[in-house]
Image (cartoon, coloured by chain):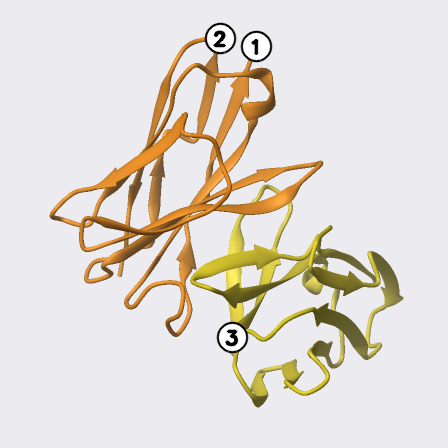
Amino acid sequence: KNEVEQSPQNLTAQEGEFITINCSYSVGISALHWLQQHPGGGIVSLFMLSSGKKKHGRLIATINIQEKHSSLHITASHPRDSAVYICAENRDDKIIFGKGTRLHILP
Amino acid sequence: KAGVTQTPRYLIKTRGQQVTLSCSPISGHRSVSWYQQTPGQGLQFLFEYFSETQRNKGNFPGRFSGRQFSNSRSEMNVSTLELGDSALYLCASSLAGVRGSGYTFGSGTRLTVV
C-alpha cells in the first residue's frame, strides 16, 4: 500500500484555470517535496516543505502537518505546465513517492 | 553551473548481465541519491550516498549496489539483470542529502533488459 496518496490521478483543464493537486500521507514526516516531471523523464524539484506555505512564480505549495495533507496550486495555468506532478515524503531518511498526477492544460 | 550528469542515457542489456550507471553531481554537492522509475511502481528510492558512505537504503535486493568516490561522483551497479529491472534510473544531488533543502535531478539512464 502506497502511503502517499495523490489526487486526482489525471487532470485536464483549460488554459488560465486555477489548478489544485492534493497529497495525503499517513505518518509524521520531516518534509514533503513536490516534483515536476516532463515527457521524456526530466524531473525538477519544485518545493520542499516542512510547514506553512511556499510560493514560486505561479506555483504555491501548502502543507498542514496536523491533517497530514499538502496541496500544490497553479495559478493562471498554461500549456507548458502540462506534466506529471509528484509529491514525496521524507520519512526515516527515506523518500516515499506518490504515484503522480498527470496534468494536461489545453490551449 | 553544470547540472547533474548521468551516463549513459540509454542502455540495452541481456538478462543475467550486470550494468554500471554513473552520476556526476553538481559541484560542491556531497549527497547523491538514486531512484528507479517504472510504469507499474512509479518512483522508488534506491539509496543515498553522502561523503562516500551509504547513508540510506530503500527496499531493493542486494543485486542493486552503489558507491561514491571522493569527488562525489557515484556509480550504481545492478548484477544478474532481470527483465523487471527495465526502468528509468535517476540520480539526484544535494548539499545536505535527502533531509536537506532540495535536490537536483539528472536526466536519467533508461535501461532496457531483454
Q: Do the residues labelled 1 and 2 touch (CB within 8 Å)?
A: yes
Q: What element carries label 3?
A: strand
Q: Name the residue under label 3.
A: A31
Amino acid under disc 1: Val
Residue B106 vertical position relative to residue B111 in the rendered view, above or below: below
Label 3 Cα crowd, 10 Å radius (few <14 / some 14-19 / many 20+): many
User: In the image, residue B43 lies at what x, y percent?
Assistant: 59, 47
Nearer the observer, disc 1 or disc 3? 3
Q: Is residue B43 above or below residue B88?
A: below
* CA distance for labels 1 and 2: 5 Å
Q: Tell me the residue at 81%/79% (across/down).
A: A18
Of A79 and A24, which appears nearest the observer?
A: A24
Q: Which amino acid does label 3 sit on?
A: Ala
Q: Mark 2 points at which residue?
A: B14
- What chain is tagged by disc 3? A
The disc numbered 2 marks a residue on which chain? B
Shown colour of chain B: orange
Q: Earlier in the sequence, mark 1 or mark 2?
A: 2
Instruction: Classify residue B41 as left or right of residue B22.
Output: right
Which residue in the structure is indicated by mark 1? B114
Dot 1, crowdedness within 10 Å: few (<14), some or many (≥20)?
A: some
Q: Are the residues flagged by discs 2 and 3 in contact, CB closer than 8 Å?
A: no
Q: Distance between the residues labelled 1 and 3?
A: 38 Å
Asked if labels 2 and 3 share a chain, the reply is no
- Camera-nearest residue between A9 and B41: B41
Q: In this view, does A31 lie to the left or right of B2?
A: right
In the rendered structure, which amino acid carries the disc numbered 2?
A: Thr
What color was chain A assigned in the picture? yellow
Q: Nearer the viewer, residue A17 or B58?
A: B58
